[in-house]
Amino acid sequence: MDLRFTPEQDAFRAEVRAWLEANVPSEAKGTGPLPSLDTAEGFAAHRVWEQAMFDARLSVVSWPEEFGGRGAGLLEWLIFEEEYYRAQAPTRVGQNGIFLLAPTIFEFGTPEQQARYLPAMASAREVWCQGWSEPDAGSDLAGIRSRATRKGPEGEGGSWVLSGQKTWASRGAFADWCFGLFRTDPTAERHRGMTYFLIPMDAPGVTVRPIAQLDGETGFAEIFFEDVEVPDDQVLGEVGKGWSVAMATTNSERGLSLRSPARFTEAAGRLLALYAEQALLDPVAAGRSADAVARAAMDAEAYQLNTYWTVTRVLGGTPVGPEASMNKLHWSETDLAIHRCALDLLGPEAELLDADGRPGPWLDGFLFALAGPIYAGTNEIQRNVVAERVLGLPRS
């Protein structure tokens, strides 16, 4: 693995940094920060931001040019992510589509599906939510009960009728589309007989009920499907092979796409700065957290180096396999460790709310980090995956 960047990559980094410095919303410019994307106002504002990036051809740099990208590689994407987090740019409102669904469409979608969905996704003209979890099927995705029944002939002119319920749909309160798994053969074995559908949220029979988070904002939703008709051209991959399609999405969710290392190295940098500040105020109290701070910072850097190694392997033709579960364990635990250290350093001060009654950035980040070991498949399940599929251990 060669960690040196080429002159072209250095030039790309300089371009990205300059654009972000000129365009990221900020108080200093009188343009930000943007309202929370878990509100209707914030969701709309983040769409505008994503459109600006799309216009600059920076929203999806690694995608082919015909879909709004630059045809750059994964290393350029990592460079972009480093600069994006360095600039403390807004959270990506379209991340479910860009980082999870898009790689799956590239792998399984028809040329017509790619042309239809990818440009609208890159510009945030259409924002996606994930319709997987159900009230009785969370990490055990094979336990889903929502169904799709054939209506009409197969192929052109045919359709499916969807029924069931999905829950914990991130971005579901305001999203335009949903990608989800439904059982098309209820007699098949648990991991078979499922099909992957692309569903407009304004289709007749779709009901969205927002779910309030701890802060009262609607970052999630539950979605009810009551005889929702979906045409055949909104099936992604083969009918009955939805499990394989979904596993490609989960590899993106747990592997390279969803959580770039820049998210954690930037947080680790802020943690080190906080430690230095607190050490000046109370060196004895700060010293008690020194080892934990050092470990969290090293773990963030280790994740960064591991990601560069993984990208090197991918560029050499090795796919990301079940090792993606190890990535998920690493970044979720590292995120928690960084924020726990920050709260320990701040002490009771960490619990102070701002003038609007909202938690400070470290407490807010900690509350979100608590969800890391749960979403994208609980860490308990991921440890089973690592044991069985990476280490080759027998089932208990």
Image (cartoon, grey):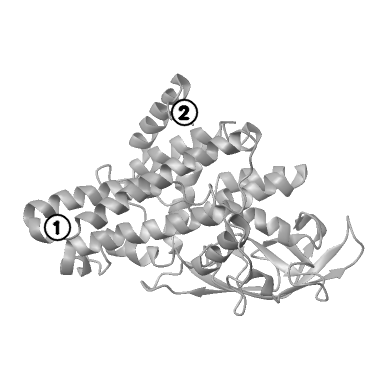
- Above or below 245: residue 51: above
* Residue holding disc 2: 2
Pick whichever, 75 or 157, lies toward us: 75
Q: Residue at point 47% right, 47% down?
A: 48
Q: Residues within 10 Å of mark 2 (few under 14, many from 20)?
A: few
Q: Residue 285: image x %, image y %? A: 11, 61
- In the image, is 279 to the left or to the right of 260? left
Q: Residue 247: image x %, image y %? A: 66, 57
Q: Which mark is residue 286?
A: 1
Pick whichever, 283 or 355, lies toward us: 283
Local SS, label 1: helix
Q: Residue at point 68% right, 48% down?
A: 105
Give the residue type that dot 2 points to: Asp
Q: Residue 208: image x %, image y %? A: 58, 73
- Among the two numbered marks 1 and 2 on one chain, the one whose residue lies closer to the N terminus: 2
Is residue 345 at least partly visible in the picture? yes
- In the image, is 392 to the left or to the right of 14? right
Give the residue type that dot 1 points to: Ala
Pick whichever, 371 or 101, lies toward us: 371
- The quadrant in which residue 204 appears is bottom right
Is residue 62 at least partly visible in the picture? no
Local SS, label 2: loop
- Above or below 67: residue 295: below
In which quadrant is the C terminus drawn? bottom right
